[in-house]
Structures are given as C-alpha cells and as structure tokens.
C-alpha cells in the first residue's frame, strides 16, 4: 500500500514539475529580446556577445557581456567591454562598462 502511494506521489510530482518548465521556444524568444535590447543600447555595430547568464527567479535578471568598438578616439575606434543587465519582468535593461581585473 505504502509503495503504491509513494509511486503515485512521485509520478504526480514529476508531471507537475514538467508542466511548469519553460519551453525551448520561450527561452529562445527571451534571449532574442535580451540580445536585441542590449545590442541596441550598446550602440556597437557588430559586438561580440556572450551567452546569456540567467539569474534565479528571485532576481529575475539576465546578463550579457558585450565587446566591441565605440566611436572614434584619435582616429581609431575604441574597444570597450560592456555588461548589460536585463529585467525579465519589466523588459528594461541597464548597461555599464566594465574592466576585467583592473585592465
């Protein structure tokens, strides 16, 4: 009796967990939106972009690292590193330059 009850409970938990999981299409749509927003805000023509860094649901953020050229400094383009933090709930992003290990 106990074995049947435990097995039934496990099956219910497994199927419930699957129903709450996001589909690959939903993740791809989110990542496309994050890329478009962050690349647009960066004002870079063709930046290198990292894979999305997804924070837990309590934070609700996705981050991207971008590297590319901005403007012209003394006749040549300046290479910069940017971090973009995208809020999944509001769809807004903020972007800031970062220096890797003080460089």
Image (tube, rainbow, N blue to C red):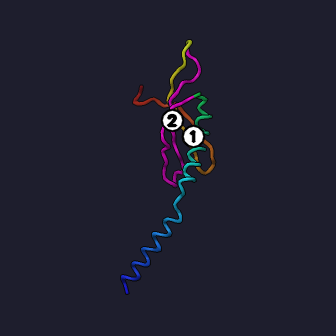
Q: Where are the magenta residues, as a range?
A: 46-73
> What residue occupies the far top of the structure in this picture?
74
Dot 2 surroundings within 10 Å: few (below 14), some, or many (20 or more)? some
Q: Quadrant of residue 96?
A: top right
> What residue occupies the far front of the structure in this picture?
25
Q: Quadrant of the C terminus?
A: top left
In this rendering, position of residue 53 left or right of residue 46: left
Q: Which mark is residue 35?
A: 1
In this rendering, position of residue 1 left or right of residue 34: left
Q: Earlier in the sequence, mark 1 or mark 2?
A: 1
Residue 2 within the segment the image draws in magenta: no
Q: Nearer the viewer, residue 25 or 19?
A: 25
- Eyeballing the image, is 71 above or below 95? above
Dot 1 surroundings within 10 Å: few (below 14), some, or many (20 or more)? many
What residue sits 36% from the left and 82% below the top?
A: 3
The residue at which mark 2 appears reads as: 49
Q: Which mark is residue 88?
A: none
What residue sits 49% from the left and 70% below the top?
A: 15
What residue sits 53% from the left and 45% below the top?
A: 62
Task: Point out residue 82 in the picture as x, y percentages from the top left corner.
Answer: 52, 32
Q: SS at mark 2? A: strand
Asked whether disc 1 touches disc 2, contact meaning CB atoms under 8 Å apart, the reply is yes
Q: Nearer the viewer, residue 2 or 15?
A: 15
- Eyeballing the image, is 83 above or below 30? above
Task: Point out residue 33 in the picture as x, y percentages from the top left corner.
Answer: 60, 44
């Amino acid at each position: 009796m106990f074995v049947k009850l435990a097995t039934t409970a496990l099956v219910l938990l497994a199927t419930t967990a699957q129903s709450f999981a996001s589909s690959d299409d939903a993740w791809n749509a989110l990542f496309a939106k994050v890329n478009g927003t962050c690349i647009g805000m960066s004002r870079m023509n063709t930046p290198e972009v990292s894979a999305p860094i997804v924070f837990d649901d309590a934070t609700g953020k996705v981050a991207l690292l971008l590297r590319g050229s901005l403007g012209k400094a003394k006749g040549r383009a300046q290479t910069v590193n940017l971090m973009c933090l995208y809020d999944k709930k509001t769809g807004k992003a903020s972007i800031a330059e970062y220096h890797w290990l003080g460089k």
